[in-house]
Structures are given as C-alpha cells and as structure tokens.
Image (cartoon, grey):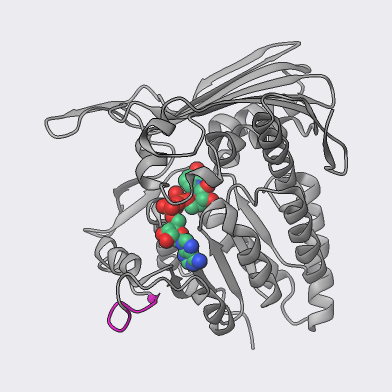
Amino acid sequence: MAFDGKVNILVIGGGMICEEATLPAIFQQRKQGNVGSITIVSLNSAIIARLRKVFPNEDFVGVPDPATTPADKNIPDGYKECLKKLPKPGLVYVTTPDHLHTQMILDSVAAGHHVVSMKPLCLKVDEGRRIVAAARDAGAYVFTEYHKRLDRAIRGLRYRFRQGELGQPLYGHAWIEEPKYMPLDKFKAWAHNSSPFEYIGTHYVDAYYYVTGLMPKRVVGFGQKKYLPTVGSKAYDANQVCIEWEDGSVLWVQTSWVCADKNAKMTQQGMMVHFTKGEYKADHADRNCYFVTDEAGFQHYNPNFVKPFDDWNEEGVIDWRGYGIESNSRGILDVQHLYRQTEGLDEAAAKKKRQEILATWARMNTRALPENAMVGVAVNNAARMSFDAGGKFVTIDKDFNIAFE
Ligand SMILES: NC(=O)c1ccc[n+]([C@@H]2O[C@H](COP(=O)([O-])OP(=O)(O)OC[C@H]3O[C@@H](n4cnc5c(N)ncnc54)[C@H](O)[C@@H]3O)[C@@H](O)[C@H]2O)c1
C-alpha cells in the first residue's frame, strides 16, 4: 500500500516532559498532516485522565482506560500490548524515567517500530551497546531527544566552529541547575536512580560532542548529599563532572537540583567555551525577557524552548514553537523521510536503504542516533562510577570501555 505520509504514534509515559513538549509537538504535527493514529500508554489510568483534562480538544487512545481501570492500578507492562497493536509506520516515544528506557526501546525495535527516546538514551554502556546493535540490525531509527542540538544558540556555535572561525577548543564550562521540587516532587519515585548530572548534565556533554565531534577520554566527578538526605531522599543534591576529551580540551559541567523552589526560572543553564581563536559565552535560560504578574511574581521567559503562541490563521488554536518542539517533531519527519526513500522496495531492500541513510546521519552527527548518543551514555556511566567512588578518575576508550584509572 502506498505511504500516505502519516506516521502512527505510541507514546509511553505521560509525565512532565511528555505533557510539556512531546505531546504539543505530536498534536501539532498531526494538524500539519504528518501523523495518523496516536496512542498514549501510561503506568496507570490517573495519568491518562489528567492528560485528557490538559488536552481536552485532542483525540487519542489512552491506555489504561480511566473508564474501566481503577486510577491507582499500575500496569508496568501495558505498553507491550500497545506495541503489538501499533500500525506501521510506527514511531514510539519513550518518555519514561531514565532507567526504564532500554527495555522499552529494545521491545519497540523488536516489534518493527522506530523510536524517539527522551535523553539520556540509557544509563549504562552495555545497555547502549545493545540498543546500537538492535537498531543497526533492524535498520531502525532510534533518536535521542537531545533538544539542545536544535537550539540556534548551540547550532550557531557548531556552525562557526566548523567554519574554522574559533580555532581549537581549550576548555569549556557549562551549568544546568533545577529547584528542589524536581527530586522531591516531580521525580520523587526515581530521583535516587539518577542524579542531576545524569538527568540533565548530559545535555551539555552531548552539546560539546555535537559542536566539536570530539570523543571523551577521561572523566572525574564529585557529588554532595547534604540537603536531600535531611528530607528523606537518597539522591545527590549536586554533581560536578570534568571531562577530558581526546584532544586534551576539558569541559566542566556543574549540576544541581536543590536550587530554591522560588527561583524565577525552572532550569538555569548556560555554557562558555574558550578556543585558540575566540570564545563563546551564552546564558541558555536568561534570554533577557521577563514577565511580572500579581499571581506568579517575577519570571524569566525563554521564548526559544517550548512556548505557545496564537496560530496565524485559526482562532483559539495554539501555534507551538521552539527548539523543544522542533526536536520532538524531528522523529516524525525523519521516519516520514525514511518511508518516502524506501517506497516500493521489498523489505530486504528497504532495510538496506534505511541502514545506509542512518549510517550517513550517524556520521554527520546532526541528530543523536544511538552511535552518537553513546557519548552521553558513556560519560554518564563513567561519571556515576567516579562520584560514587568519591571522585576517582575513570577512563573511556574509543569503544566506550570504561574503567577506573
Ligand atoms: N529533554 C529534557 O530536557 C528533559 C526534561 C525532563 C525530562 N527528560 C527525560 O524524560 C524522561 C521522563 O521525564 P519526565 O520529566 O517526564 O518524568 P516523569 O516522572 O514526570 O514522567 C515519567 C512518566 O512515566 C510513567 N511511567 C513509569 N513507568 C512506566 C511504565 N512502565 N509504563 C508506562 N509509563 C510509565 C510515569 O508514571 C510518569 O508519568 C526522563 O528520561 C527524563 O530524563 C528530559
């Protein structure tokens, strides 16, 4: 049957990032004619009921169904049945906690679908290797949603660096820090399985690799547990990680999730890189744009990430914009491209063609395919070893083998 240009979507998860970025992007892509069916499967029906309230005008199949399933009945394997029912071309968005990504990605690929995973791809190198191998064998598209790659403030750095204007990198410094309500409320169930570095610091490790193409060589990390243990959490308050790259340049990434809850921005973040012929400095949260209201007080407003605007043509319709929307939409457009390029071919020829396209994209390192996302995975894995061991150096070789120095 001819490809009608529509990609069928299964979203696994339904939490914060799903509601704020993934679903707005998918619903908008549907308005633009690029999406067929949409199913959202979550841990329990209360999450589906909430999403119905948040998106009252959007049509989707919700699993488990709130009409027939008690709100608090958890069904962790419910996604498996949904994978079987997802029509081809199928694209699965994995928006569950970090430590659950691997099995869901592998199951999706095994069911013949393509995948968009929230970052990080996974937490361990051996899991990442399994994802790389499964995706390659199947010619499956597995995209890690490192949305900073779509931020023009970082794309511009990559472009000018690759034009040779900046010379060679010497050192960089990045910071990304969030409030206490993240580990204590939003991520209460899983914060101790991750850390502020693994959960969001990974963005800047990936950004440095995306800009420079360099591979990490050695990692040392530190962590503090002073505040969170006093309120019953086993998670780190803060982590700082220093990465030495293959050319001897060094990136320092500082992360925390114990900023003040009343912070005027949810995620304070930015980066500087010093090169032999110039430097780059950017605050990626403070875009010099503020609101003050009676209800919310002073708030930074970042128009670049994910923001609703009035649609140009239709009254009452939202036009979602920003690099978070572009990044969450990328998978739909890429899968569409893969299907268009392989239309009319038998499955063996189509798979070969997909493998060629995906290998080219991985070499270009524009989107984070699993081979590219492995850099973030390896640094996360090494950093966790380092800060759990009280700050020991960990080496990473070119095959992503990691070991204490
Ligand atoms: N790109 C970013 O900047 C960014 C920001 C936030 C989170 N994330 C990543 O996105 C992922 C999700 O984060 P979040 O903030 O939405 O977390 P969250 O805890 O708010 O949401 C996770 C959701 O997954 C659901 N879930 C858990 N187990 C499930 C299962 N077996 N089947 C179906 N659903 C299940 C939970 O019920 C919850 O609704 C994480 O990997 C996180 O690191 C990325």
Instruction: Judge whether 254 appears above or below 69 on screen.
Output: above
Left/right of residue 143 with respect to residue 127 in the rendered view: left
Furthest toward the right, the residue is 398
Q: Quadrant of residue 159?
A: top right
Furthest toward the top, the residue is 277
Which quadrant is home to the N terminus?
Answer: bottom right
Q: Residue at x 39, y 57 (%)?
A: 24
Which quadrant is home to the C terminus?
Answer: top right
Using the rendered image of the protein, determine whether residue 13 is visible from the camera's viewpoint: no
Please give the count of numbered marks on the rendered protein.
Answer: 0
Furthest toward the bottom, the residue is 1
**Please, what is the dominant secondary structure of the magenta stretch?**
loop
Q: Is 10 or 210 nearer to us in this picture?
A: 10
Specify the segment rendered in magenta: 61-69
Q: What x and y, as percent, mark residue 261? A: 31, 30
Q: Residue at x 27, y 28 (%)?
A: 262
Furthest toward the left, the residue is 294
Left/right of residue 54 with respect to residue 117 in the rendered view: left
Q: What x and y, as percent, mark residue 291? A: 24, 28
Left/right of residue 117 with respect to residue 216 in the rendered view: left
Magenta-span inclusion, residue 310 = no
Instruction: Judge whether 256 appears above or below 7 on screen.
Output: above
Q: Residue at x 39, y 51 (%)?
A: 16
Q: Is 144 or 30 nearer to us in this picture?
A: 144
Using the rendered image of the protein, determine whether residue 41 is visible from the camera's viewpoint: yes
Q: What x and y, as percent, mark residue 144? A: 62, 52
